[in-house]
Image (cartoon, rainbow, N blue to C red):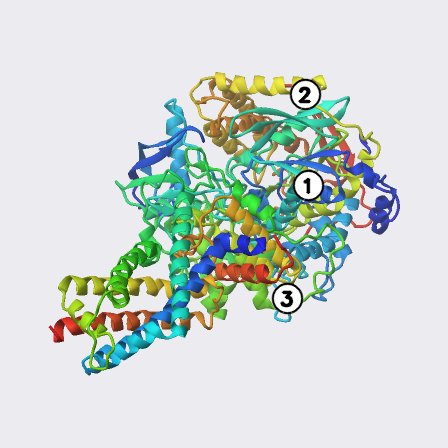
């Protein structure tokens, strides 16, 4: 054990209650004397900034977007889980806890996950009170659906735009505090470094993306809510601006980075259509409730299909392999994301993929359309079908959708203790930015839950513990650490601007993404990882000697912004590979080909790897130091996940 | 890698793009040629191709706003061939695909134009006026914690659905951009309707509409003349009915609130 | 009473004045049209002249006249204020290419142009039939009423006057085709049950009223000259 994870003593069900009582409180009159910086204003950051301001703290919130309403939380489609048991179908806090731990393949902390399940019920109440228009039954009560393979209906939703509605709820709460003057909002400001004074996080350095000005901001605590790092793969369902820079800068200033190799691949995305592809679009997982996944039974048939010699409709039922239904009769098409993704890849690797690239499987709605009619299907999935047609030019009412897995979410992130504090005192991480509660695999509809839980109901309590021990004296940017950090930021920007090579930031980014997807994507092996590490190191050297930028740093310069982010991805990518190489087991989203059951399922090694791998930065070009936080399971029995 | 349609022929296009250094300078249209554009590309991917070309040649890439590229974040905002978000109805710029254009086409690309949306650079504009309108009252004043159970107040499904439809506004600003008067009424009305329809929004109903309209006027948006361009160009189909609701809410509030200002 | 001022000078407040005055003017059109239908009576204008006499002397009507003038005044004044504001809201740099015609009706975008045509007509119309009636010596008919009918007849036998009159009615028709339903929308009266009815009534109203007015000069020009 390297670090106190501050998990409270006592029975699982009482830990959070007890902890809330034990954390020190900040005198209400003193709260206005504390400044808190919140970087990122999506669900986790927006909720935190609003809630902290409501408590009386002075909040400075930062986003690189033009408005907090643009954060990528907005794109979450399916829903948000909560253990309300409104449907009387046997749900409970413990069941949500259990499902999350099991779904995460036993690589998450029991205490955190239980707390998440506990506060999940408050989130729904809060959002309803904010005016979030959740779907309702005819009687006026909230509707639920079963989602992502859960055996109970606990997912609250707002058609296919739940993330949008929840984000706009948090945005409205934030807007209210901005109007009150309790939150000072800095839009189009990108955090480029963390400032540490006497071992504590005391501020950040930002760049104004409109005029290029470098600014110093001081506070008593810094909260990072900057999302995940899925864009390390270049192609992912993340938005284009999503990046790891804030988290990575914090990591290099001392915050440990936990489980970086745990990335989630979402099975139902629209396949890549060409090398110009800039991002991948997710089709909600809810489609798997009614769509059937298949590929042709034989490689020959698949080849003829790819060449356009036969049409989909020419393939008879007998020649189709509904591989998920065949292999997992109990769960069928609703197996967890990692299982569904890996199987799709396996089919394509066997040569049975469809689409002209052969990197896709079918998701077929013919049966449900036949059974309930096109209108009923349109009621349920109309917007998704329309989106699919817009992007591909194909009509999913007439022919099956083509889907392929894509990087979607990163379970890894900055290591935090039970208080959501990183290894740097005064620095907190919330939402997807932290290594979080999802273990090695996140369940559907749980990302929104975790972001809002952290922002609304956890951080506002736990941050006080540290602040109560910090004197309420004003903090300023006078300390030399600020000037030093700013100088480093400026030097780095100048260096990027002065390379004057031949390759663009996107060019390097695509190359990096290709390496990561090929060797550290859905399936990994030791040899590939070693190869990828060397490739990335080479690519990083090329980056710093052959990057091409134009314009200046004192104006809006989107290529410069990109370059800084790619530079950080190039370092983070290597750490992901180190982590994947270190973890000699398969679990959740991390599948090492050497470690699988005879049936090809992930084979965990609980004896040796039931730990959180928290990596510690140890200087430029030095191997990072691995710290292990052992995971203990007292309330669940570790079993091999089986969805047969 | 081939596209979904292997027979689709690549296109060559002429782009007329608005270039403007910053807010304080004037801009002009500059012509560019792009080659071998796949019909399966999105419009923004086509601009990516242009920008990669420009950067390699040592020119400055065209600045434009975008992020999610799946039609929900509301960042992208291009005025394409005289239409907000281009020629296809119900579509954001990022969801517009090149198969809607033909080989040899000339495409004019401009930023949103409104006094309240100053140009940052090239095609990127400042839409913070929208944020300030929301800050003026586009929320329900409930602090975190203490909310009653989600099922405490039943909301008829039909009302919840209508509130949802108004709430789907993505804040892109196409309504302002396409309106002859650069009016923001559709944007404002979407939020006012959403919260006026729901019981949770009822408490602050009057102050909300009074304050939001006052802020809207202060930002310098034009007035609605019921032309309907906004709703026709809205990528998420916010209906004109919301503007009627806004007018009604405003009139009722002004006539009955205790606010003497 | 600053709240009244603030309400009426807000963008929505001004629109509401436009709507109320506009719909009020619509009601005037109906009265005006019905009264003028007496031109078709074929009695050599006796009924029409009696009606004109009543309209110009009855104190109630004179009061209504003041309200009517105020209605026109506010409608025109608010239109000017809103047009200026709306034009400046776009900013100095207009779109280089603007295909607004693809997403909206010509008439809805050109209410100001249509209104200006109507205003020009109104001035000519008022000079001819109002100013001259009140302030110029006119002959009397057999019932000793001023013979406005004769003035109408001479006017409607002048081709350019008829052309102006018909053009103005076309403009008025387009103005109303948008304005009638638009007024209800501005007053917040939009409902999925009633709005289609309002729109249909608006169309019928615009066409019938304007056709009625246009029929008068055409009738005199074609059949009486």
- Are labels 3 and 1 assigned to the same chain? no
Determine which quarter of the picture holds residue B199. Answer: bottom right
Establish if A213 lies above or below C131.
above
Q: What residue does disc 1 label?
A: A49
Q: What residue does disc 2 label?
A: A482
Viewport quadrant of the N terminus of chain A? top right
Viewport quadrant of the C terminus of chain A? bottom right
Determine which quarter of the picture holds residue A257. Answer: top right
Q: Which mark is residue B155?
A: 3
SS class, disc 3: loop
Answer whether residue A601 is visible to the viewer in this image. no
Taking the spot 26% from the left edge, 68% from the top edge, the residue there is: C133
SS class, disc 2: helix
- Are labels 3 and 2 assigned to the same chain? no
Establish if A302 lies above or below A254.
below
In percent of width and height, residue A356 lies at 39, 46
In percent of width and height, residue A303 lies at 39, 48
Chain under numbered label 1? A
Query: Quick one: A9 or C192, which is closer to the camera?
Result: C192
Chain under numbered label 2? A
In percent of width and height, residue C116 lies at 30, 55
Taking the spot 62% from the left edge, 17% from the top edge, the residue there is: A487
């Amino acid at each position: 054990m390297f670090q106190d994870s501050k998990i409270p003593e006592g029975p699982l069900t009482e830990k959070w209650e007890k902890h809330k009582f034990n954390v020190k409180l900040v005198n209400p009159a003193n709260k206005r004397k504390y400044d808190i910086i919140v970087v990122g204003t999506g669900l986790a950051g927006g909720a935190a900034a609003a809630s902290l301001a409501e408590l009386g703290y002075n909040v400075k919130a930062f986003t690189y977007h033009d408005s907090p309403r643009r954060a990528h939380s907005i794109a979450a489609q399916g829903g948000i889980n909560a253990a309300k048991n409104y449907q009387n179908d046997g749900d409970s806090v413990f069941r949500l806890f259990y499902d999350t731990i099991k779904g995460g393949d036993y690589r998450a902390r029991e205490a955190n996950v239980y707390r998440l399940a506990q506060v999940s019920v408050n989130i729904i109440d809060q959002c309803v009170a904010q005016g979030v228009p959740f779907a309702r039954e005819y009687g006026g009560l909230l509707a639920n659906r079963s989602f992502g393979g859960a055996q109970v209906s606990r997912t609250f939703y707002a058609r296919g735009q739940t993330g949008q509605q929840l984000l706009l709820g948090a945005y409205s709460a934030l807007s209210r505090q901005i109007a009150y003057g309790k939150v000072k909002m800095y839009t189009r400001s990108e955090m480029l470094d963390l400032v540490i004074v006497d071992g504590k996080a005391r501020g950040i350095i930002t760049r104004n993306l409109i005029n290029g000005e470098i600014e110093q901001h001081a506070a008593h605590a810094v909260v990072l809510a900057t999302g995940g790092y899925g864009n390390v793969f270049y192609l992912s369902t993340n938005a284009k601006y999503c990046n790891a820079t804030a988290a990575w800068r914090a990591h290099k200033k001392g915050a440990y980075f936990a489980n970086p190799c745990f990335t989630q691949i979402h099975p139902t995305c629209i396949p890549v259509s060409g090398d110009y592809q800039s991002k991948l679009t997710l089709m909600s997982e809810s489609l798997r409730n009614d769509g059937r996944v298949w590929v042709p039974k034989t490689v020959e048939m698949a080849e003829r299909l790819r060449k356009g010699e036969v049409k989909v409709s020419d393939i008879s039922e007998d020649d189709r392999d509904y591989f998920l239904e065949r292999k997992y009769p109990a769960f069928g098409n609703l197996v967890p994301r990692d299982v569904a993704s890996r199987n799709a890849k396996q089919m394509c690797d066997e040569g049975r993929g469809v689409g002209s690239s052969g990197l896709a499987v079918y998701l077929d709605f013919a049966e449900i359309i036949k059974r309930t009619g096109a209108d009923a299907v349109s009621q349920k999935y109309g917007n998704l079908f329309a989106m699919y047609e817009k992007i591909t030019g194909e009509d999913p009412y007439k022919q099956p959708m083509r889907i392929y897995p894509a990087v979607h979410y990163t379970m890894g992130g900055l290591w935090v203790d039970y208080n959501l504090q990183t290894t740097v005192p005064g620095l907190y991480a919330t939402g997807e930015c932290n290594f979080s509660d999802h273990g090695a695999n996140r369940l559907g509809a749980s990302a929104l839950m975790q972001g809002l839980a952290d922002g609304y109901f956890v951080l506002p309590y736990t941050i006080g513990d540290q602040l109560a021990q910090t004197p309420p004296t004003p903090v300023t940017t006078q300390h030399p650490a600020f000037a030093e950090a700013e100088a480093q930021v400026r030097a780095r920007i100048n260096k990027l601007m002065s390379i004057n090579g031949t390759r663009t930031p996107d060019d390097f980014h695509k190359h990096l993404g290709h390496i990561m997807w090929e060797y550290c994507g859905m399936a990994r092996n030791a040899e590939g990882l070693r190869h990828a590490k060397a490739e990335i190191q080479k690519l990083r050297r090329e980056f710093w000697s052959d990057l091409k930028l134009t314009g200046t740093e004192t104006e809006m310069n989107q290529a410069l912004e990109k370059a800084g982010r790619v530079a950080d991805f190039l370092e983070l990518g290597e750490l992901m590979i180190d982590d994947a190489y270190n973890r000699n087991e398969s679990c959740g989203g991390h599948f090492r080909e050497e470690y699988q059951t005879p049936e090809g399922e992930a084979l965990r090694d609980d004896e040796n790897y039931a730990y959180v791998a928290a990596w510690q930065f140890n200087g430029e070009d030095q191997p990072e130091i691995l710290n292990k936080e052992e995971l203990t399971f007292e309330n669940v029995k570790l079993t091999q996940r089986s969805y047969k | 890698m081939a596209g979904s349609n292997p027979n689709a022929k690549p296109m060559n296009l002429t782009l007329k793009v608005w270039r403007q250094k910053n807010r304080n300078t004037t801009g002009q249209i500059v012509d560019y040629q792009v080659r071998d554009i796949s019909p399966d590309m999105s419009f923004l991917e086509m601009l990516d191709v242009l920008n990669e070309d420009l950067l390699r040649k040592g020119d400055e890439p065209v600045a434009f706003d975008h992020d999610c590229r799946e039609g929900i974040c509301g960042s992208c905002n291009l005025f394409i061939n005289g239409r907000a978000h281009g020629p296809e109805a119900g579509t954001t710029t990022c969801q517009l695909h090149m198969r809607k254009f033909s080989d040899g086409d000339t495409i004019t690309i401009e930023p949103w134009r409104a006094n309240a949306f100053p140009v940052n650079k090239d095609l990127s504009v400042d839409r913070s006026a929208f944020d300030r309108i929301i800050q003026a009252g586009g929320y329900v004043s409930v602090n975190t914690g203490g909310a009653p159970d989600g099922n405490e107040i039943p909301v008829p499904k039909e009302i919840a659905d209508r509130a949802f439809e108004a709430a789907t506004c993505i804040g892109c600003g196409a309504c302002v951009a396409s309106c002859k008067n650069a009016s923001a009424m559709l944007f404002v009305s979407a939020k006012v309707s959403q919260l006026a329809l729901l019981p949770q929004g009822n408490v602050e109903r009057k102050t909300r509409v009074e304050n939001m309209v006052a802020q809207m006027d202060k930002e310098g948006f034009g007035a609605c003349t019921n032309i309907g361009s906004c709703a026709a160009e809205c990528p998420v189909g916010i209906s004109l009915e919301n503007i009627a609701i806004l007018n009604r809410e405003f009139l009722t509030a002004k006539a009955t609130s205790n606010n003497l200002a | 009473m600053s709240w009244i001022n603030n309400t009426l000078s807000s963008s929505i407040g001004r629109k509401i004045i436009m709507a109320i005055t506009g719909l009020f003017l619509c009601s005037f059109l109906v009265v005006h049209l019905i009264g003028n239908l007496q031109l078709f009576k074929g009695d050599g204008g006796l009924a029409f002249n009696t009606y004109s006499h009543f309209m110009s002397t009855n104190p109630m009507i004179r009061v209504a006249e003041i309200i009517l003038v105020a209605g026109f005044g506010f409608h025109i004044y608010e239109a000017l204020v809103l047009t200026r504001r709306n034009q400046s809201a776009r900013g100095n740099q207009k779109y280089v290419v603007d295909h607004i015609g693809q997403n909206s009706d010509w008439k809805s975008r050109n209410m100001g142009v249509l209104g200006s045509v109507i205003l020009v007509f109104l001035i000519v119309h008022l000079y001819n039939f109002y100013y001259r009636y009140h302030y110029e010596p006119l002959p009397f008919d057999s019932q000793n009423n001023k013979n406005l009918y004769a003035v109408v007849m001479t006017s409607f036998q002048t081709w350019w006057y008829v052309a102006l009159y018909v053009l103005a009615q076309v403009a008025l028709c387009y103005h109303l085709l948008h304005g009638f339903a638009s007024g209800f929308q501005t007053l917040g009266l939009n409902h999925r049950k009633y709005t289609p009815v309002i729109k249909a009534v608006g169309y019928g109203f615009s066409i019938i009223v304007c056709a009625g007015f246009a029929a008068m000069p055409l009738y005199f020009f074609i059949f009486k000259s």
